[in-house]
Image (cartoon, rainbow, N blue to C red):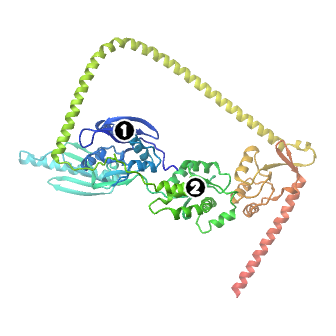
């Protein structure tokens, strides 16, 4: 099963040392640029790597060991300080005690190889799947220091006093401007002020926000200076890229209102929601934030297309009942759970029945899984991927041979003199290489200049000619595309008009007196057949030939409908509903409340006419008469029951 939790919408740089060592000679790095697929592989120097990070601002710089990019903690903090605001440094192998990259890659199904370029690619792919820990050296606090921009020293006397007072007054005004900006942005802060003659010597604001969220930037202007610096941590902190998300069973009830329920492996209902506005992508995002689906279930068979799309997006197993779950079974299974509407109940029932169906597999996997193995991973592979339990346990508990050539980069604190020597040597080497490159480039440029000058005139003439041709070709292509679009629009309009004409012909057959010409003659009435008593079938019939107030509706299969389906049919206000099969209690109650006559189709002779249906008006009137008698009897029984109830309550009160 895929462990990826969201679409990758930015680039990831995977980095690994290709040659050299970060403590000695300037190393070269294997660089893999990944944005859902590998777009570039390159070998770059440290300087070029940092320049590309600064210029392209990738979402993540991923490595198997953060000390491959810095020799010690001070260099690491300096590196983190120089990263773009939206770029994270991620160590994909863990935090303070990293695992071997090969083991992490195998656990997440990522290709791995020993060459540096393959290790860099593995790191990039793992980070794109939210595997690993962000390396952080700074808190979410920022200091904003407002201070003097120049010295207050002078020649003495009244001029020096006025100069000092002016500078301190400028610092005070700048501090007030910073304070106003922070308050306008709604940021919390603490302020410490050093008051001096004429105003402030400095003011320090400790703001509860990151530098990029503060509407103040570092600057120096005349008498004042503003410095914005993030607050450094005492040490290095590791923040997981993705929070823990447990394995779950997911039940989905699609439709105008979509409901989703999550059930834990132990059968607990974790969360349930229903919405009329969210699309499929929003539903998937809601599930992602709360769990990792093992099974996606529906309460009807076959699985609806919307539920199948959700299941496929997680590569989860599917579950549907042998036949549509009856309403009473869903009510019984969810009787101890809270829900707001029938849609939430149906989604919850689907997830609970799916979990019940896999109860024995989950129990065996739980009992046989060792304590140090992730039980959720075992259940996911046994239930979701249908793998044998013994094979899964054997794979997850297999020990790996130690890697003899793993390189551990344990940081060593260098002395100030050693760091200075190292930096100077690296600088000298870079300058020498740069000079050699410039000299070689200069020679090449001199040789090329003469040739370019000779070709320039001819190239300009050729370019002008090609530009004219491109403009003419583009105009012709635009005209052609426009005409093709207009032609396609006209064809679609013709198809729509033809379909509309066919529907009008069908309606004419129903609404005109020539129905009397049908074999049998007499007074006939049009019948609108509906294949099943479901929302989809009713809407399909309405789209096909329309259902209007006063129509006779024939339900070929009236079983299984609930309140929502019955209310949809009642909203059309049919004259009478002829049914084949029995109605559910809920549907019968809704139709009775809306005074929609219902009768058995067996009492009416229905004949097909050009894909539509007709029936005798006398038969329909007989059904209506029978319904009125049943309605009167039902109302009389209700009144008798109400009277009995009132008498019983009166007697109880009197006693």
Residue 503 numbered mark, or none? none
Dot 2, crowdedness within 10 Å: few (<14), some or many (≥20)? many
- Is residue 600 shown above or below 36? below
Q: Which residue is mark 2?
A: 295
Is residue 249 or residue 557 the one in the foreground? Answer: 249
> Is 84 placed left or right of 220 in the picture?
right
**Residue at horizontal 23 percent and vertical 30 percent from the top:** 433
State the residue at coordinates (48%, 45%): 7
* Image point (71%, 33%), residue name: 495
Q: Position of residue 439 (x, y in %)?
A: 23, 23
Q: Are marks 1 and 2 in contact (CB under 8 Å)?
A: no
Residue nearest the observer in this picture, 360 or 294: 360
Res 195 seen here: yes
Is 365 rendered above or below residue 450? below
Q: Say which element carries label 2.
A: strand
Marker disc for residue 31: 1
Q: Quadrant of residue 334?
A: bottom right
- Element type where label 1 sits in the image: strand
Mark 1 vs mark 2, CA separation in Å = 38 Å
């Amino acid at each position: 099963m895929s462990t990826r939790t969201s679409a990758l919408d930015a680039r990831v740089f995977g980095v690994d040392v290709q040659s050299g060592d970060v403590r000695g000679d300037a190393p070269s790095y294997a660089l893999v640029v990944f944005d859902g697929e590998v777009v570039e592989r390159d070998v770059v120097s440290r300087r070029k790597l940092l320049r590309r990070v600064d210029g392209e601002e990738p979402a993540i710089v991923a490595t198997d060991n953060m000390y491959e990019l810095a020799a010690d903690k001070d260099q690491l903090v300096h590196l983190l300080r120089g990263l773009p605001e939206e770029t994270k440094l991620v160590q994909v192998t863990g935090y303070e005690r990293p695992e071997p990259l090969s083991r992490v890659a195998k656990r997440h199904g990522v290709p791995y190889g020993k060459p540096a370029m393959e290790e860099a690619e593995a790191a990039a792919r793992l980070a794109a799947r939210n595997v690993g820990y962000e390396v952080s050296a700074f808190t979410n606090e920022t200091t904003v220091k407002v201070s003097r921009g120049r010295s207050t020293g002078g020649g003495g006397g009244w001029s020096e006093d006025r100069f000092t007072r002016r500078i301190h007054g400028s610092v005070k005004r700048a501090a007030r401007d910073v304070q106003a900006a922070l308050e306008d942005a709604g940021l919390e802060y603490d302020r410490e002020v050093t008051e001096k003659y004429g105003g402030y010597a400095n003011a320090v604001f400790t703001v509860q926000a990151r530098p990029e969220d503060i509407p103040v930037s570092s600057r120096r202007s005349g008498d004042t200076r503003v410095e914005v610096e993030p607050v450094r941590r005492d040490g290095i902190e590791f923040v997981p890229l993705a929070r823990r998300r447990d394995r779950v069973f997911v039940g989905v009830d699609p439709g105008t209102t979509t409901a989703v329920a999550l059930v834990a492996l132990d059968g607990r209902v974790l969360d349930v929601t229903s919405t009329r506005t969210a699309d499929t992508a929003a539903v998937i995002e809601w599930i992602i934030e709360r769990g990792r689906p093992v099974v996606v279930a529906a309460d009807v068979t076959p699985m609806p297309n919307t539920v199948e799309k959700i299941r496929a997006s997680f590569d989860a197993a599917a579950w549907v009942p042998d036949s549509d779950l009856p309403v009473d079974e869903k009510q019984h299974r969810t009787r101890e759970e809270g829900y707001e509407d029938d849609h939430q109940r149906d989604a919850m029932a689907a997830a609970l029945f799916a979990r019940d169906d896999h109860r024995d597999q989950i129990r065996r996997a739980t009992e046989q899984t060792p304590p140090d193995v992730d039980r959720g991973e075992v259940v996911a592979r046994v239930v979701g991927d249908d793998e044998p339990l013994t094979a899964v346990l054997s794979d997850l508990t297999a020990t790996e041979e130690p890697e003899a050539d793993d390189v551990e980069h344990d940081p060593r604190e260098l002395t100030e003199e050693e760091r200075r020597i190292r930096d100077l040597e690296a600088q000298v080497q870079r300058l020498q290489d740069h000079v050699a490159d410039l000299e070689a480039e200069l020679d090449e440029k001199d040789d090329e200049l003469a040739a370019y000058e000779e070709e320039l005139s001819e190239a300009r003439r050729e370019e002008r000619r090609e530009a004219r041709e491109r403009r003419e070709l583009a105009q012709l292509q635009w005209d052609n595309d426009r005409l093709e679009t207009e032609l396609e629009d006209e064809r679609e309009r013709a198809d729509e008009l033809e379909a509309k004409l066919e529907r009008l012909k069908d309606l004419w057959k129903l609404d005109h007196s020539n129905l009397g010409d049908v074999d049998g003659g007499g007074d006939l009435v049009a019948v609108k057949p509906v294949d099943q008593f479901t929302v989809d079938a009713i809407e399909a019939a309405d789209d096909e030939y329309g259902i209007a107030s006063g129509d006779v509706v024939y339900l070929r299969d009236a079983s299984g409908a609930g309140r929502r389906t019955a209310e949809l049919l009642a909203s059309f206000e049919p004259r009478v509903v002829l049914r084949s099969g029995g109605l559910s209690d809920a549907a019968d109650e809704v139709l009775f409340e809306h005074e929609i006559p219902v009768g058995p189709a067996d009492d009416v002779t229905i004949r097909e006419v050009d894909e539509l249906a007709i029936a005798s008006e006398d038969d329909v009137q007989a059904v209506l008469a029978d319904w009125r008698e049943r309605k009167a009897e039902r109302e009389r029984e209700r009144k008798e029951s109400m009277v009995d109830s009132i008498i019983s309550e009166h007697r109880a009160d009197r006693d």
